């Protein structure tokens, strides 16, 4: 930016050009400058006429020159350097007092580099001191006691006068410039904080919407897990009841009683889940990045149990490992044996194997593993009639793993059951919400496997 073309605001401060009439953005700024220029023109006209009369020049020419010089003050906001230079140039003619004061203030308050401001202020001060010194010398020559005042004293008085006419407007302009910068900085900071608050509010709304969506998904998943397994078993038993109703009344009676028990269990689980939804105030879990599931691709699911601690215990229950599961209203690993027994009662050949020493793993982790096994057995009931299944549960030092496999169907007809296709997706969401790994797919022999690993340090 050119130092002679710095745009100055209405308060005498420089800044980027703004729309308005010429370089004035407000009418009051124009009126102020016009008033100052008029006063300065009158002053310079009087001083110019007086100086011309002393030097033998036509007073009218001096007054006209003074009007032109004083009117330069109208340009102070646009070219403050030029105004100060004009004031320095006419200082030997002892004119432009107001012009110099206002010009120095505007220059110091503008965005002109400070070294230029200091140089022009020094030039103005030096010119004022020389003019004052010459005036004092001329006055002393005509006085009778001229010898009583020495030259050093005259220099000191001249310097003090120059300092008094130069320093105050410069310091006042520097103060106005610093204050304006501070106000602009505070305004920018306030605008930045306002923008940050708006962004935070938008993010809060997004998080709330995401939380509502996650909660809806969780409720749908819970409803699916609770209803699908029980209803699938009830449908299987209803088909069996229809087949033996006339041939074996005693077996039909037992099946009917079992259907009633399953219906009551389904209602009980639904009531428990709805009670949790009404009263629980837990934070919605955020899905974590899905790590690569142990066991690799389909057909290598047994690799998930490589190096498991402890001995294998065929057909053993998981033990009482979730004493505090009721705090969240969900099932626990201690109920896996009963879950497997229900499938066995429905005619499925299913076996439970537990590896490692059972331990509490936290109610949420245990409920997740239980629901995965439950959904996997439900899928066997739906899609692989007569197939044998194997549930393998392994306790490790910092995780718990489960593998559910089933062989191909033996051709036994199955009762058609509705399926929304969300079973595997729901299992994956449950597992990844704990930062675990999930893998599912067909096996080489035509069966299917589900492999799960969930971090579960000892509680």
Image (tube, helix red, strand yellow):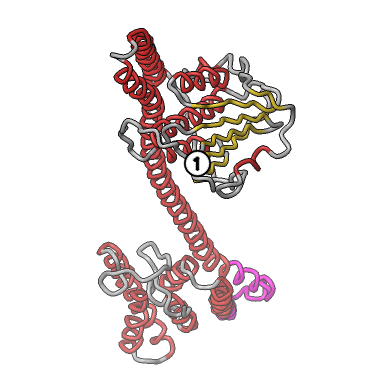
Q: Residue at x 53, y 62 (%)?
A: 171
Q: Is residue 110 left or right of residue 321?
A: left
Q: Is residue 140 left or right of residue 93?
A: right
Q: Nearer the viewer, residue 184 or 352?
A: 352
* Up/down of 66 relative to 18, above or below: below
How many numbered discs sit on the rendered protein? Answer: 1
Give how far across and how far down residue 215 sits, in percent. 39, 32
Q: Is residue 142 visible?
A: no
Q: Residue at x 47, y 78 (%)?
A: 1
Residue stretch rendered in magenta on the structure: 136-160
Q: Quadrant of the C terminus?
A: top right
Secondary structure beneath dot 1 equals: strand
Mark 1 surroundings within 10 Å by alpha-carbon count, few (fewer than 14), some (14 through 19), many (20 or more): many
Q: Residue at x 37, y 81 (%)?
A: 69
Magenta span includes 300: no
Most frequent secondary structure within the magenta stretch: helix
Give how far across and how far down residue 72 sits, in percent. 36, 79
Q: Residue furthest front?
A: 247
Quarter occupied by residue 240: top left
Magenta span includes 155: yes
Which residue is labeled 1 in the image? 448
Give how far across and how far down residue 157 sits, in percent. 61, 68
* Up/down of 414 relative to 183, above or below: above
Q: Is residue 31 visible?
A: yes
Q: Nearer the viewer, residue 68 or 220?
A: 220
Q: Is residue 219 left or right of residue 312?
A: left
* Up/down of 81 relative to 453, above or below: below
Give how far across and how far down residue 330 sits, in percent. 48, 20
* Up/down of 255 relative to 222, above or below: above
Q: Nearer the viewer, residue 194 or 437?
A: 437
Q: Nearer the viewer, residue 430 or 335?
A: 335
């Amino acid at each position: 930016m050119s130092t002679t073309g710095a745009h100055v605001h209405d308060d005498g401060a420089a800044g980027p050009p703004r729309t308005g009439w010429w370089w004035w953005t407000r009418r009051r700024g124009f009126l102020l400058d016009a008033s100052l220029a008029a006063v300065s023109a009158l002053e310079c006209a009087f001083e110019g006429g007086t100086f011309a009369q002393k030097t033998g020049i036509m007073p009218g020419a001096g007054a006209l020159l003074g009007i032109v010089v004083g009117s330069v003050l109208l340009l102070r906001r646009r070219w403050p350097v030029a105004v100060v230079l004009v004031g320095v140039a006419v200082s030997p003619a002892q004119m432009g007092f107001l012009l110099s004061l206002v010009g120095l203030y505007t220059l110091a308050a503008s965005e002109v580099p400070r070294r230029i401001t200091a140089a022009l202020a020094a030039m103005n001060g030096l010119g004022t001191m020389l003019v004052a010194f010459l005036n004092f010398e001329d006055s002393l020559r005509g006085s009778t006691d001229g010898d009583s005042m020495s030259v050093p004293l005259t220099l000191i008085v001249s310097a003090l006068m120059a300092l008094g006419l130069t320093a105050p407007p410069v310091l006042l302009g520097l103060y106005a410039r610093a204050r304006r910068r501070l106000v602009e900085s505070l305004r920018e900071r306030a605008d930045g904080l306002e923008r940050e608050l708006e962004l935070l509010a938008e993010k809060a709304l997004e998080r709330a919407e995401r939380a509502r969506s996650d909660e809806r998904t969780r409720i749908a998943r819970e409803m699916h897990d609770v209803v699908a397994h029980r209803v699938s078993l009830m449908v299987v038993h209803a088909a069996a009841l229809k087949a033996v109703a006339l041939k074996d009344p005693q077996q039909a009676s037992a099946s009917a009683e079992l259907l009633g028990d399953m219906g009551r269990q389904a209602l009980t689980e639904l009531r428990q889940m709805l009670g949790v939804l009404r009263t629980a105030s837990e934070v919605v879990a955020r899905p974590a990045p899905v790590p690569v599931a142990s066991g690799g691709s389909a057909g290598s699911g047994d690799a998930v149990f490589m190096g498991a601690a402890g001995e294998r215990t065929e057909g053993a229950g998981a033990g009482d490992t979730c004493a505090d599961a009721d705090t969240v209203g969900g099932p626990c690993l201690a109920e896996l044996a009963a879950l497997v027994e229900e499938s066995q009662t429905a005619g499925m050949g299913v076996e439970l194997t537990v590896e490692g020493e059972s331990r509490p793993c936290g109610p949420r982790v245990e409920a997740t593993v239980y629901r995965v096994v439950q959904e996997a057995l439900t899928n066997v009931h739906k899609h692989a009639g007569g197939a044998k299944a194997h549930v393998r549960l392994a306790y490790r030092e910092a995780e718990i793993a489960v593998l559910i496999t089933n062989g191909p169907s033996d051709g036994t007809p199955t009762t058609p059951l509705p399926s929304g296709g969300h079973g595997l997706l729901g299992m994956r969401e449950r597992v990844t919400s704990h930062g675990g790994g999930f893998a599912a797919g067909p096996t080489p022999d035509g069966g299917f496997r589900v492999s799960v690993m969930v971090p579960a340090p000892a509680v």
